Amino acid sequence: INAPVGSSPIFINHSDFGECETNLFVTLQEAESWATRFRLYSGRPLDEANPVLDTEITLPFGRARVAAITRTLSQAGLAFAFRRHRERPWTFPLFIKNKFFNPLFAGLMSFIIDGGRSLLIAGGRGSGKTSLLSSMILELMRSYRIVVLEDTPELPIELYRKLGYDIQHLKSRSVITHVESELAPEEALRTALRLGDSALIVGEVRSKESTVLFEAMRIGALANLVAGTIHGESAYGVYDRVVHDLGLVPTSFKALDIIVIANVLKSPDGLHRFRRVVEVVEVRKKWKEDPLVEGAFVPLLTYSAKEDSLKPTDVLLNGESEVLNEIAKRV
């Protein structure tokens, strides 16, 4: 819903039909009423001093993430973007049915998750990172305790609890809105590590909390899964982001075991878009200066556009994966 409100209709990005223009218009009175409700619902400000509001709403017919902006960021006043979530979470079998990945990936990741390794899911906006992270939680044994940390709640926590999961949900300060009454991401993550033996799930790595997250990976979060999402188009892109953008010490990156890359692909005519896992990369530990030059990024699965499927590499087929062999040593 673009500013100024009422000058243009509501636009919808539909999963099957792409960008659609509706015949619905929002009045200024409605927009201001929504903004008031979102402020009350989230406990976060939306005014000229704080022109961005990031929150989630839950209604009887579904959940959605809300981004609202106003002056001084938007000169024409209020504007909104809603991103609706599935009512029921994605699962590995459902992803296989939709060709997001194949059964080989599902089996490999289930083994790695059960092995208590550290992993990041990378990709661009709308590539399915959070949905994939959500499905990985369902691969954990329900006897494990899980601590989830998000700055804007997106994961269906209540549904996990109904399924019998032992789960503690934490909400940290958004790096966009800077609400002082909320705990900073790095402090919230340190608190999560003090909550005892548990798998650690971080909604999205955006800022200084990356240092604490990799610290958690280095100690293995007490031999449980440590997982999160991050923006990045490749394994080196993830390294570049956390080291050069977020300020992580390069050698701390060795604490990461697996990087899963998801992307949005296009059909040859450019009319259709598909979400796919395009690569699973193992991070080797024997490098000093540059992990790319020194061969630290070793693919285990790579995407074949011709077959529209993930294919195993020789490293995986020949049993040369260091991560899988480390898991095997403990069994």
Image (cartoon, rainbow, N blue to C red):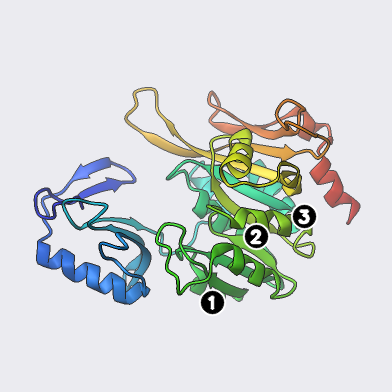
Q: Is residue 63 left or right of residue 191?
A: left
Instruction: Find residue 101 and report its horizontal and vertical position in percent.
Output: 57, 42
Q: Is residue 182 left or right of residue 61?
A: right
User: Tag on residue 218?
Assistant: 3
In the rendered structure, which amino acid carries the disc numbered 2?
Glu
Q: Earlier in the sequence, mark 2 or mark 1?
A: 2
Asked if the residue under mark 2 is in contact with the one under mark 3, i.e. CB atoms within 8 Å, the reply is: no
Residue denoted by label 2: 139
In front of the other: 282 or 215: 215
Dot 1: what SS?
Answer: helix
Instruction: Find residue 49 and report its horizontal and vertical position in percent.
Output: 30, 63
In front of the other: 110 or 182: 182
Dot 3: what SS?
Answer: helix
Nearer the observer: mark 3 or 2; the answer is 3
In front of the other: 180 or 149: 180
Q: Label 3 neighbourhood size at 10 Å, few (<14), some (14-19), many (20+)? A: some
User: Which quadrant would residue 221 be assigned to in this image?
Assistant: bottom right
Q: Earlier in the sequence, mark 1 or mark 3?
A: 1
In the rendered structure, which amino acid carries the disc numbered 1?
Lys
Distance of label 3 from label 2 (alpha carbons)? 22 Å
Distance of label 1 from label 3 (alpha carbons)? 32 Å
